Amino acid sequence: MLQVSERIAALSPSETLAMSQKSNELKAQGIDVINLSVGEPDFFTPDSIKEAAKQAIDENFSFYAPVPGFLSLRKAIVEKLKRENKLDFSPEQIVCSNGAKQSVCNVLLSVVGRGDEVIVPAPYWVSYVEMVKLAGGANVIVTAGIEQDFKITPQQLEAAITPQTKALILCSPSNPTGSVYTQAELKGLADVLAKYPQIIIIADEIYEHINYIGKHESIAQFENIRDRTVIVNGVSKAYAMTGWRLGWIAAPQWIASACNKLQGQYTSSPSNIAQKAAEAAYLGSQDCIETMRQAFERRRDLIVQLASDIPGLKVRKPKGAFYLFPDCSAYLGKSFKGKVIANSAELAMYLLEEAHVAAVGGLAFGAPDCIRFSYATSDDQLTEAMRRVKKALAVLA
């Protein structure tokens, strides 16, 4: 019988992309859907970055590039890390890929093997656990609830470590929660990790610049674990460049070399035009970052206020990214027209079908009592979306 490999059969489809697709299908039928499921800025890429891409086309950047990216782009990333993060890397330690998603997957495929364990704090971004499966590893989920602002403690981390632990994935600012680890909290985790030299730390910092508490803190700043920490970042969120597909890692040389070797066999370099656009983003004015950050902060305050007015929702004020992740457990087990809503995925589907608001159930993020709303849309859309959500939840019995 013809069938897909065990590798593919074991993977789950992306729930965030699935909800976005369902939303678009309803829109195509003429239904007014407000899409709060998608994780991307609603701003356009700044003109100066687009101009750099056009110039790259005119200057015939149309031939194969080095697998890890143009040296000029990797040097620009090195300068960014030094300027903004006070971290020293060489261009040889930078590998550019087709989005930060590929960057994370490259690292996991390069360091994780059959039987290795990867610690994944929950709530987590939906793709982490699937990538660990793809690498043949085992997910060790460490749950941090809303009462601890969705952040794991050093004690929880240490309790999860075994002789088989190979890596930790840490996302700050977080998708889906918007939580941000402070320097003190990161130091607590780093001090635990320092005792276990076999553990690789994968620090997903793609939301670095969408931060409402001031300065971004990277776990790579701590000397006792720096030589085995991989920073994952890219241009998608900070510069509104999701569709350009340009992410990167800054890693210990042996991991960078492994990712370069892997990528050379299955995608080679990312798009030349996207690379030149990213180079312009890092070398040009950074004013666009603050303009967008301020807009997201205003929207954050708006959606927190509106969601807090909905009876039964438990709301924490996010410190970064552009997601609200309220606890919706008060509505689970309730019903509409005789159909019981058993979990947050079913609640998200109910809101899509009845309120025409697309969100993503927390089940996909390892947090079955929560639901994710993206507030990367206009104030008017957010106001109307929360009005619809409040009305739809009120009729559940």
Image (cartoon, rainbow, N blue to C red):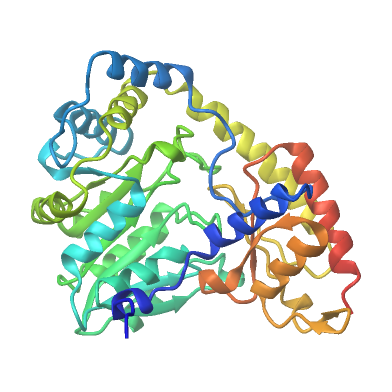
Q: Which residue is depicted at the point 16% across and 41% down?
A: 68
Q: Which residue is depicted at the point 33% across and 27% down?
A: 282
Please tell me which residue lies in front, 278 or 274.
Answer: 274
In this rendering, position of residue 217 left or right of residue 240: left
Position of residue 24 measured from the top left corner of the image (x, y, whole percent): 65, 51
Quadrant of the image for the C terminus? bottom right
Please tell me which residue lies in front, 203 or 188.
Answer: 203
Position of residue 41 measured from the top left corner of the image (x, y, whole percent): 55, 39
The image quadrant of residue 182 is: bottom left
Quadrant of the image for the N terminus? bottom left
In the depicted structure, whether residue 228 falls above or below residue 343? above
The tally of labels here is 0
Is residue 326 visible in the rendered structure shown here?
Answer: yes
Position of residue 357 measured from the top left corner of the image (x, y, whole percent): 74, 55
Q: Residue furthest front?
A: 1
In the depicted structure, whether residue 62 falls above or below residue 331? above
The image quadrant of residue 121 is: bottom left
In this rendering, position of residue 384 left or right of residue 275: right
In the depicted structure, whether residue 396 falls above or below residue 58? below
Q: Which residue is depicted at the point 78% across and 56% down?
A: 356
Is residue 219 visible in the rendered structure shown here?
Answer: no
Please tell me which residue lies in front, 98 or 290.
Answer: 98
Position of residue 91 measured from the top left corner of the image (x, y, whole percent): 13, 36
